[in-house]
Amino acid sequence: KKDVNILGIETSCDETAVAIVKNGREIISNVVASQIESHKRFGGVVPEIASRHHVEQITLVLEEAFNQAEMDWEDIDAIAVTEGPGLVGALLVGVNTAKALAFAKHKPLIGVHHIAGHIYANRLESEFTFPLLALIVSGGHTELVLMRAHGEYQVIGETRDDAAGEAYDKVARMLELPYPGGPHIDRLASEGEESIDFPRAWLEAGSYDFSFSGLKSAVINKIHNGKQRGEIIKKEDVAASFQASVVEVLTEKTLRAAEEYQVEQVIVAGGVAANQGLRKSLDQKFSGTGIPLKIPSLKLCTDNAAMIAAAGAISYERGNTAKLDLNANASLLL
Ligand code: KG4
Ligand code: ZN
């Protein structure tokens, strides 16, 4: 059987990324240009700046992906691109690049959902076994997704307000930590005590949905009231107590869903999957269940294009290609 090489393109937020993946499983090259430095001083991603950076970077990143792979266009079977969700102006840069290349090089075009990409990042390290439960925790998403086969997604729970990563970034901002705040809170949490009793949003019995806005408000109130009373509240303790609440709810709901749906495998995806506290807690809880737990290496947790190529490979196999009128969709459903 002939090898299939997919070129992946990802520009949904603040990383300009291009990768080449062989047979859906093997990374040939994986180039990511981060814009974090440009957005830092604003405390978050500025959409207009993101789009402009993507335009500047995309051809350089594309060239680099081919150089690292030591490949040429004749080696590429199809082009996969993130069509949504994300910032529309940012997505459009990737979508238009992919369309222009597909047209000029006569290659099939494949639209990929960003979250499908995060899920398929795991397949670059180990094969899937179904049914599979995926916990997706990123700056824009907190979802529990059940998969019974490749390319089939059933969302069984999602956040009703903030995403987990968004909550991390907002709390970090209150603690005057740089953007993105997740890694900073993670580090501080390891140095602090879980001395503050923040709420856990379990929601209705049996629900796999999440909510982080109440927790965020509780953290704001704690810091605000503490300041007014002249109390000294250690940032480390706020971080440790906040993280304990997030991690406990994510772990418990994932465990409960895994048992209810009798899955063969649990995988974690998205930027917050890099969180040391979450990784430890999930490892501990799942080690006793016999259900294998897979968390991708740090580089594949955050946004990249190898994951988009990996998800695109499944669509390619099924002949699920897009036409040249493919458009960016900021709120695309999984
Ligand atoms: O998946 P990602 O790179 O981009 C989105 O698709 O959103 O996720 C970025 C998010 C940010 O909110 C960032 O603060 C969070 O992931 N994050 C973390 C950690 N590393 C990144 N959150 C908690 N702990 C971390 N170690
Ligand atoms: Zn992402």
Image: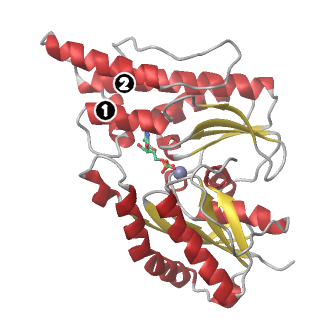
- Which element type, helix, strand or loop, lies under badge 2? helix
68 lies left or right of 195: right
Q: Which label was assigned to residue 240?
A: 2
Residue 58 appearing in the image: yes
Disc 1 C-beta below 8 A from ligand 1: no
Q: Residue at x 39, y 24 (%)?
A: 216
Q: Residue at x 16, y 17 (%)?
A: 227
Q: Residue at x 68, y 64 (%)?
A: 111
Q: Residue at x 23, y 36 (%)?
A: 176
Q: Label 1 crowding class (10 Å Cα cut-off): few <14, some 14-19, many 20+?
A: some
Q: Quadrant of the N terminus?
A: bottom right
The answer for how far apart the CA atoms under marks 2 and 1 are is: 7 Å
Q: Can you say whether 142 is above or below 257 in the image?
A: below
Residue 30 appearing in the image: no
Q: Label 2 crowding class (10 Å Cα cut-off): few <14, some 14-19, many 20+?
A: many
Residue 29, picture quadrant: bottom right
Give the amino acid at mark 2: Ala
Say which residue label 1 marks: 188
Q: Which label was assigned to residue 145?
A: none
Residue 237 percent across, percent down from the top left:
30, 21
Q: Answer whether labels 2 and 1 touch (C-beta < 8 Å).
A: yes
